[in-house]
Image (spheres, rainbow, N blue to C red):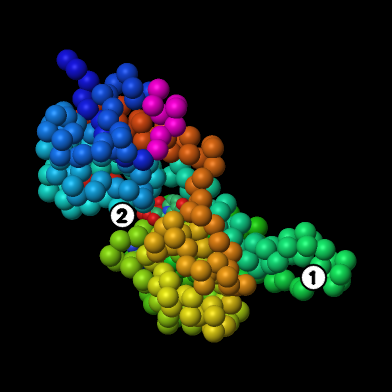
């Protein structure tokens, strides 16, 4: 029997491809110039898709694959995949939970330290000769002993709370349902923001969190407060964020994710109050290798017995 077809959307490492090539007939979306022409010849042979958290599976691609049975996502966030449409067609979807928790937590600590300790400005001070010309750099703020609110206390949120412990913080959190954890729960995000020095966003994207961090939340965080977003750009109202930073109603923002990636608004780039990263929350060799391995294992397990190793909750019953 011939190997099932696999449509690859986005990048993959050599290691991933070396494990998949003997098992699947691989098609590469970026190499398809005319989807209809390609689909008339190959669409029916493709039973699996491998994609990433940014591209998902575009509706036209879904429609071109009548026998699609499994989607393996490279990343834990799967808001780019239309899971309702997949469930309606009996298509199973997997993602890569847990293997990136530590790295995203590291990225959060990086943004926290860079923001509060003035890393950007101090580095520029050292590099530009300002130290010799102007004297000591302005004082920064300590990360120690702060009240840190975590919006989304799931797998990564808990790892962030654990790794933050070196700074002796008071951890508080907001989620839709209260968790069995030793931190104060806030059912109201604005109330939590009022109590926080730092607010860390680490929820999934999608409709339920769209612009959940709005003007009221940002202004409640206040002129000395810091927002850190390592979740999805959609979670924060970017226009309200720019206005709050520009007016001084919010102190600082450390951002790994943006509304229209890879575009970053000029106002955020120009601001003295921001630390910006190009969506690199999990982007280390080690963590990406672990994510790639899990993405591949989902596909190999599906080929072997029709099940996925780490299905997303919406599809776990399929
Ligand atoms: P989990 O599913 O383990 O945790 C999600 C948490 O968010 C839960 O505590 C959930 O609690 C809470 N939550 C969900 N919806 C809402 C809502 N509407 N309001 C308030 N809280 C909500 O996910 P992970 O921790 O594994 O991953 C979280 C997200 O991090 C991913 O979906 C992805 O978007 C992002 N991410 C970003 C990366 C980057 O590179 N910057 C890398 C990896 C992940 P409850 O259900 O009770 O509300």
Element carrying mark 2 = loop
Task: Single out the residue that lies furthest toward the top.
Answer: 1
Residue highlighted by disc 1:
137
Visible in this render: residue 159?
A: no
For the point 36% across and 58% down, the residue is 204
On screen, residue 206 versus residue 195, left or right, reads left
Q: Where 73 falls versus 213 (above or below)?
A: above
For the point 41% across and 34% down, the residue is 12
Q: Position of residue 59 (x, y in %)?
A: 19, 49
Q: Position of residue 57 (x, y in %)?
A: 25, 46
Quadrant observed for ligand 1 in the rendered image: bottom left
- Main SS category, magenta section: helix
Q: Position of residue 104 (x, y in %)?
A: 51, 51
Res 98 label: none
Q: Quadrant of residue 127?
A: bottom right
Q: Position of residue 242 (x, y in %)?
A: 49, 76
Residues packed near mark 1 inside 10 Å, few (<14), some (14 to 19) or many (20 plus): some
Residue extent of the magenta highlight: 11-18
* Quadrant of the frame with the C terminus: top left
Visible in this render: residue 272?
A: yes
* Quadrant of the frame with the N terminus: top left
Task: Single out the residue that lies furthest toward the front.
Answer: 33
Q: Where 270 falls versus 222 (above or below)?
A: above
Residues packed near mark 2 inside 10 Å, few (<14), some (14 to 19) or many (20 plus): some
- Does the magenta-highlighted stretch encompass residue 72? no
For the point 47% across and 75% down, the residue is 241
Residue highlighted by disc 2:
79
Element carrying mark 1 = loop
């Amino acid at each position: 029997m011939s190997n099932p077809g696999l449509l690859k959307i986005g990048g993959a490492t050599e290691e991933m491809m070396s494990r998949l090539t003997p098992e699947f007939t691989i098609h590469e979306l970026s190499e398809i110039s005319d989807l209809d022409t390609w689909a008339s010849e190959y669409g029916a042979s493709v039973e699996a898709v491998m994609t990433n958290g940014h591209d998902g599976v575009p509706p036209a691609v879904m429609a071109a694959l009548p026998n699609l049975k499994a989607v393996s996502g490279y990343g834990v966030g799967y808001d780019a995949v239309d899971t309702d449409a997949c469930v309606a067609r009996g298509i199973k979807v997997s993602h890569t939970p847990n293997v990136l928790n530590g790295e995203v937590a590291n990225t959060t600590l990086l943004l926290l330290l860079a923001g509060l300790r003035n890393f950007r400005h101090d580095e520029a001070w050292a590099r530009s000769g300002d130290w010799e010309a102007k004297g000591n750099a302005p004082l920064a703020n300590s990360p120690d002993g702060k009240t840190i609110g975590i919006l989304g206390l799931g797998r990564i949120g808990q790892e962030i709370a654990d790794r933050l412990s070196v700074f002796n913080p008071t951890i508080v959190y907001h989620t839709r349902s209260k968790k069995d954890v030793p931190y104060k729960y806030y059912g109201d995000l604005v109330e939590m923001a009022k109590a926080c020095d730092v607010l860390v966003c680490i929820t999934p994207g999608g409709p339920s969190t769209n612009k959940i961090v709005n003007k009221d939340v940002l202004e409640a965080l206040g002129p000395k407060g810091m927002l850190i977003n390592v979740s999805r750009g959609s979670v924060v109202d970017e226009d309200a964020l720019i206005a709050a930073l520009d007016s001084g109603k919010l102190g600082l923002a450390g951002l790994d994710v943006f509304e229209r990636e890879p575009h970053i608004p000029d106002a955020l780039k120009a601001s003295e109050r921001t630390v910006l990263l190009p969506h690199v929350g999990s982007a280390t060799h080690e963590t990406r290798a672990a994510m790639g391995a899990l993405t591949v294992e989902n596909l190999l397990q599906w080929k072997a017995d029709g099940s996925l190793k780490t299905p997303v909750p919406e599809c776990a019953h399929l």
